[in-house]
């Protein structure tokens, strides 16, 4: 498989967010010598800023201090303040209080003037409250940045509406959490749309025969937000020209939900990034901690961040087949040794293992062997893609589920894959299968039943009542390969097929934004980069959160809690 360089991203979401914040701070015309300023934030806006900017980068913009609006702050009465705030009643009240002088005790306004920047749209009642307040004479500008999203990669963003987004969308006990999460997610997708400067059509996925879906609910909510946004721009007369709307509408948002492809969160993948997140416990989703022995014999603990902004090599290798990554790293290590006289001399004097010996040792590691032999990677067609006329209880599947050399989590995922493939199957047969691995807890069995929340029937008792899966149109492509080292990942996520169909079948133009309510996998993130490279298009993908196989199983368990 030829090495593919990461395509250039003229509109990297990370860079767009960083530039929006820096521009708001640095381009404000302030009073005083050298135009020093103070930046005032609230907790939500500080969290947004921290995702793309470190404190030194902010202070470099002639900033004296960054202050939290909810805390007791040092006044700077001769310096302007640049506020970056969430547009809510609490923040507005704090701004008004900062510029309301008091006589007992006698206090001046905290700052010379105020430049207000809001992370999203400022509602008309809040604008009116500011205009009628004692702070109005001090306010020298109000702008809406639309930065309420979290760009974790150049083409990937998260909306993270709550701590339990999967539960809010799919649990029958979620109550009002669902509508609140949809509203929050729609606001944050709107921020991405506004940051990219597009006004798109909205399309959504509805399973055949389904009255509604989370994707449809999200799409309707987003369309309502878009209509409000355009009306808001007209009222405020901010950068809106009626004649341009036709050009902007060539962009498209495709809204999906997790039920469109349940295979994706369950399988092992060969891509480097997906393997790392599947097999290694990362801190905060992108930090890897490891121990090593220093030259003095002391054990050192090191933490490294796997992010495209801080690690160019990770950005280059993350979407490649693991065998390619292994070969690339070995070549680089060989090159380093051959070109460095000091390392060669040290290696010749050392009694430690040679490079070839280290490679051989790596191949003998249990983790490496497990990865090579995993049934979810090397033989998925044998157990997941069985022919429809074969019995659910076919011997190969039972043998794999009963294989104690496979770890418990792999056997559980294998069972889930098969159940999704047969669209639930017969309940009595499924219950018999659940007993085969002897590793399923009661919570695991409950999570099997919870698949019904994603459209997989789990209460069918007769073979004649089994219905074809609504996902059959978007089943995964299976690559039949003899040499695992020569081809890319075994599976193509359904999301990639959907996007490709939309681009080819409807001649979509302009920017394309895909949003998956209920979680996005590493494979789906990779697919967007591949499509952007193939079609030379600006394509982005977003979701409530990133899901790994273990996280997906945990989410399913929680739906009835």
Image (spheres, rainbow, N blue to C red):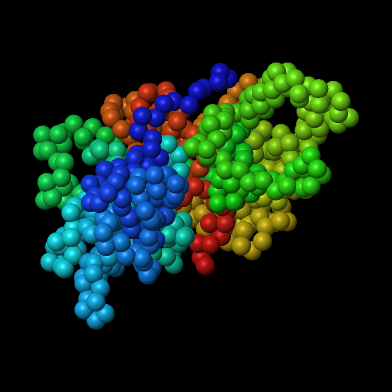
Q: Is residue 178 left or right of residue 163?
A: left
Vertical placement of 408 versus 532: above or below?
A: below
Taking the image as shown, residue 403 lies to the left or right of residue 283, namely: right
Residue 148 shows in this picture: yes
Residue drawn 18% across the image and 58% down it: 139
Say which of 532 and 65 sits in front: 65
Quadrant in the picture for residue 85: bottom left
The image quadrant that residue 319 belongs to is top right
Say which residue appears at 42% left-offset and 44% top-offset. 57
Q: Residue at x 60, y 28 (%)?
A: 321
| Extreme residue toward the bottom, this view | 104
Q: Position of residue 11 (x, y in %)?
A: 35, 33
Q: Tell me: residue 362, above or below residue 91.
A: above
Residue 503: image location, x then y, percent = 34, 28
Q: Is residue 475 visible?
A: no
Q: Residue 267: x and y, percent?
A: 59, 41
| Foreground pick, 324 / 149 | 149
Percent position (x, y) of residue 480?
Answer: 61, 25
Say left or right for 150 vs 510: right
- Of residues 90 and 486, the one nearer the viewer is 90
The image quadrant where one finds the N terminus is top right
Q: Residue at the front extreme?
A: 33
């Amino acid at each position: 498989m030829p090495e593919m360089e990461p395509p250039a991203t003229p509109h990297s979401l990370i860079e767009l967010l960083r530039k929006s914040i820096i521009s708001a701070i640095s381009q404000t015309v302030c009073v005083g010598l050298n135009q020093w300023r103070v930046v005032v934030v609230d907790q939500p806006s500080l969290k947004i800023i921290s995702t793309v900017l470190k404190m030194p980068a902010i202070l470099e913009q002639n900033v004296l201090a960054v202050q939290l609006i909810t805390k007791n702050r040092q006044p700077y009465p001769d310096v302007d303040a640049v506020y970056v705030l969430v547009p809510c009643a609490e923040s507005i009240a704090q701004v008004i209080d900062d510029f309301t002088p008091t006589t007992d005790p006698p206090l001046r306004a905290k700052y010379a003037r105020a430049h207000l920047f809001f992370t999203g749209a400022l509602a008309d009642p809040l604008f009116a409250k500011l205009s009628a307040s004692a702070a109005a004479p001090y306010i020298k500008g109000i702008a809406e940045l639309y930065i309420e999203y979290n760009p974790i990669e150049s083409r990937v963003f998260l909306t993270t509406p709550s701590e339990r987004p999967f539960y809010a969308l799919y649990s029958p006990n979620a109550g009002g959490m669902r509508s609140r999460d949809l509203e929050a997610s729609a606001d944050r997708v709107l921020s991405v749309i506004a940051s990219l400067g597009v006004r798109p059509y909205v399309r959504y996925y509805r399973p055949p025969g389904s009255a509604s879906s989370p994707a449809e609910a999200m799409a309707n909510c987003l369309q309502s937000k878009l209509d409000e946004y355009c009306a808001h721009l007209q009222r405020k007369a901010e950068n809106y020209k009626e004649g341009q709307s036709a050009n902007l509408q060539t962009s498209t948002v495709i809204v999906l939900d997790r039920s469109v492809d349940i295979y994706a969160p369950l399988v092992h993948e060969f891509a480097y990034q997906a393997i790392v997140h599947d097999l290694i416990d990362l801190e905060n989703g992108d930090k890897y901690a490891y121990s090593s022995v220093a030259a003095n014999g002391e054990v050192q603990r090191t933490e490294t961040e796997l992010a495209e902004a801080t690690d160019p090599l990770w950005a280059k290798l993350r979407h490649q087949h693991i065998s390619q990554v292994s070969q690339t790293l070995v070549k680089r290590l060989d090159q380093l040794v051959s070109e460095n006289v000091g390392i060669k001399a040290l290696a010749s004097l050392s009694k430690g293992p040679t490079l070839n010996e280290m490679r051989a040792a790596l191949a003998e590691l249990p983790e490496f062997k497990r990865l090579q032999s995993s049934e979810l990677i090397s033989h998925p067609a044998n157990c997941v893609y069985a022919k429809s006329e074969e019995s659910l209880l076919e011997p190969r599947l039972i043998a794999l589920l009963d294989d104690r050399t496979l770890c418990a989590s792999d056997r559980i995922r294998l069972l889930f894959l098969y159940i999704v493939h047969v669209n639930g199957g017969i309940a009595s047969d499924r219950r018999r299968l659940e007993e085969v691995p002897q590793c399923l807890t009661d919570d695991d069995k409950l999570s099997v039943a919870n698949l019904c929340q994603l459209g997989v029937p789990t209460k069918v008792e007769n073979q004649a009542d089994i219905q074809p899966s609504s996902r059959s149109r978007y089943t995964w492509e299976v690559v039949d390969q003899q040499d695992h080292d020569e081809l890319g990942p075994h599976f193509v996520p359904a999301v990639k097929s959907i996007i490709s169909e939309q681009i080819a079948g409807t001649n979509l133009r302009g920017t394309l934004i895909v949003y998956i309510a209920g979680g996005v996998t590493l494979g789906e993130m990779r697919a967007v980069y591949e499509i952007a490279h193939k079609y030379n298009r600006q394509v982005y993908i977003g979701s409530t959160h990133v899901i790994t196989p273990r996280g997906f199983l945990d989410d399913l368990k929680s739906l009835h809690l």
